[in-house]
Image (cartoon, rainbow, N blue to C red):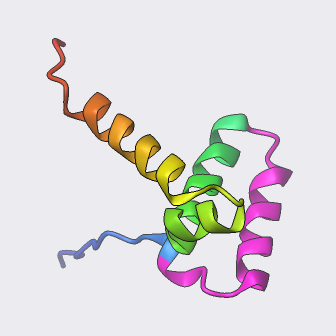
Amino acid sequence: MTEILIDYDPAEDLYTPEAISIFVNEALKTDDAAHIALALGVVARAKGMAGIAREAGLSGSIYAGHCQARAIRLSRPRLR
């Protein structure tokens, strides 16, 4: 019997403040900085970066500039 694996994005299940709180608290219990950073990234995707920027009081131009700079960095070719 062959098992079919599918991609799972936990951000899809973090749609309430309570779910986000539990998710982050569980990550904090690990005391693993990489795991905590990954969990915060998942929460950022769940909430949407524009919403986070708005809640943090960042102006649209500051956030847009950050996104543009990040896109430029990510689009540069790299040698491996």
Image x and y of residue 12, in percent: 48, 80
Q: Relative to 64, is 50 on the left or the right?
A: right
Give the total of numbered labels: 0
What is the quadrant of residue 34 in the picture? top right
Q: Residue furthest bottom?
A: 16
> What residue is shown at x 74% (from left), y 55% (from top)?
27
| Residue at x 53%, y 47% (from the top left corner) | 62
Q: Residue at x 30, y 29 (%)?
A: 73
Q: Position of residue 47 (x, y in %)?
A: 57, 73
Say left or right for 69 vs 48: left
Q: Quadrant of the N terminus?
A: bottom left
Depth check, front residue: 29 or 66: 66
Query: Which percent across, then down, holds residue 39?
Result: 63, 56
Q: Is residue 72 left or right of residue 67?
A: left
Front residue of this view, candidates 15 and 75: 75
In the image, residue 60 above or below residue 77: below
State yes or no: residue 23 in magenta: yes
Residue 75 in the image: x percent, y percent?
A: 20, 33
* Majority secondary structure of magenta residues: helix
Image: magenta residue range: 12-32
Q: Residue furthest top?
A: 79
Nearer to me, 48 or 29: 48
Q: Is residue 49 above or below residue 71?
A: below
The picture quadrant where one finds residue 31 is: top right
In the rendered image, residue 53 lying in the magenta stretch gets the answer no
